[in-house]
Amino acid sequence: MALDAASSLIAAEGLAGFSMRKVAQAMGYTVGNLYLLFSNQDDLLAEVSLRTADAMHAYLETQAAKGKTPLDRLQAISYGYIAFAQKHSFSWRLMFEHRLPPEQWNHPGLDAKQKALFEFVEGHLEPLLPDASPKELRAAATALWSSVHGLCVLASTGKLNWSGLKDARPLSDLIVRVFVAGLKQE
Amino acid sequence: MALDAASSLIAAEGLAGFSMRKVAQAMGYTVGNLYLLFSNQDDLLAEVSLRTADAMHAYLETQAAKGKTPLDRLQAISYGYIAFAQKHSFSWRLMFEHRLPPEQWNHPGLDAKQKALFEFVEGHLEPLLPDASPKELRAAATALWSSVHGLCVLASTGKLNWSGLKDARPLSDLIVRVFVAGLKQE
DNA sequence: GGCAGAAATGATCGACGTTCAAATCGTCGC
DNA sequence: GCGACGATTTGAACGTCGATCATTTCTGCC
């Protein structure tokens, strides 16, 4: 329930408006108590990120199921990613803006989530590349998903506003379509 | 020289280790003085980001000049981007991790730099797409550069470590090559 | 009721961004 | 040399933050 309060606060105010005191107040406890549940603020935020990652992954699964062809599914996943990032903007951004102190960069949970997400994409890319080796497939999935992620990042931070491109979805379509077409040709 | 001190501090300790007091101490002044030069911390950091953007742009120009063919040049630019992000990791990350308060999202300087960077890529993509309309060209350049950026972001935050892919450059090559190949086919 | 162990508290610390009255400095006329 | 006045610089003060931990409060059991 500390996690509930923290997630709500992040969703409402973002990382900038977040504080341990606000979380404590929202859950009806005092600050000291939070440090009995989490070792520090980073720890709490990492748990919130984990939650968001789970929710996003589940959402992407439902979106992927809507596609008829493999290419449809990849595009549905990309759309879902963009939609999730826009709808839960603060929570989504937390996953990337909250940088753990480097000594625990290899957070076991977060690493596993990252891996699961990439493998999820890999699974949907595989039918389109029947002749690819596992290594090639992994590289292709990583490259494709990094691309979609980059688009999402720039769109969600307003760094594409300078051009008239206010909707990221056509660009997402372009990336997936062109990337898959180029890959088949390799 | 306030900017020099601030840039050095960011380069050395990153956004997490940054404080107005440290900047003041590094330049031999006291904190109050900084607020006569910059309206607040966000303002100072925005100026540091601007500097970094300029330095990066200049560096990418030199890298682009090394390529013989248009495709070579695009790949050289991508390599340069990755190299810059790795070499000046903290400074580069500042440009994206430092999120301005939303009321001044349209910082005139930063927007101009963003635009210049994308148009720079656009200029190098153009020879490869002689038949594209200006709108198609812009979309293609935006998509391509977002992709390279996404790869760079994930690589620089260690979020690709789960797979064995420790070097981002092969993936950069893959993205540029496959993307251009797919585009030609559109 | 009394008591031990668990649970929760909140005063306290140092550091942060930011402000602004006060102190210091530089440069004139005399 | 002196005084004076504007420009420059200071650093104490305010409120908030993450984090700590001695103290208090609660809970279940005899």
Image (cartoon, coloured by chain):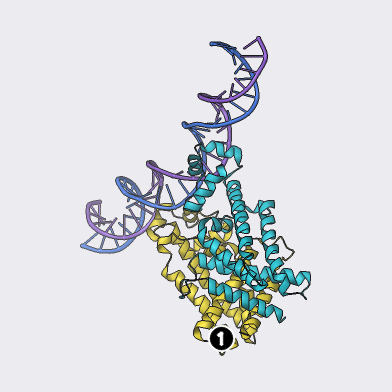
Chain colours: A yellow, B cyan, C purple, D blue
Q: Is residue B38 above or below residue B69?
A: above
Q: Position of residue C4 (x, y in %)?
A: 23, 57
Name the residue located 60 percent from the left edge and 81 percent from the top edge: A64
Q: Amino acid at mark 1?
A: Glu
Which quarter of the figure has residue A77?
bottom right
Which quarter of the figure has residue B39?
top right
Name the residue located 47 percent from the left edge and 52 percent from the top edge: B13
The local secondary structure at tag 1 comes to: helix
Quadrant holding the N terminus of chain B:
top right
Seen from this angle, which residue lies furthest bottom? A131
Q: Position of residue B107 (x, y in %)?
A: 67, 52
Q: Say few, some or many: other residues with alpha carbon within 10 Å of mark 1 (under 14 / 14 to 19 / 20 or more).
A: some
Q: Is residue D29 left or right of residue D10?
A: left
Quadrant holding the C terminus of chain B:
bottom right
- The residue where tag 1 is placed is A126
Q: Position of residue A162 (x, y in %)?
A: 71, 60
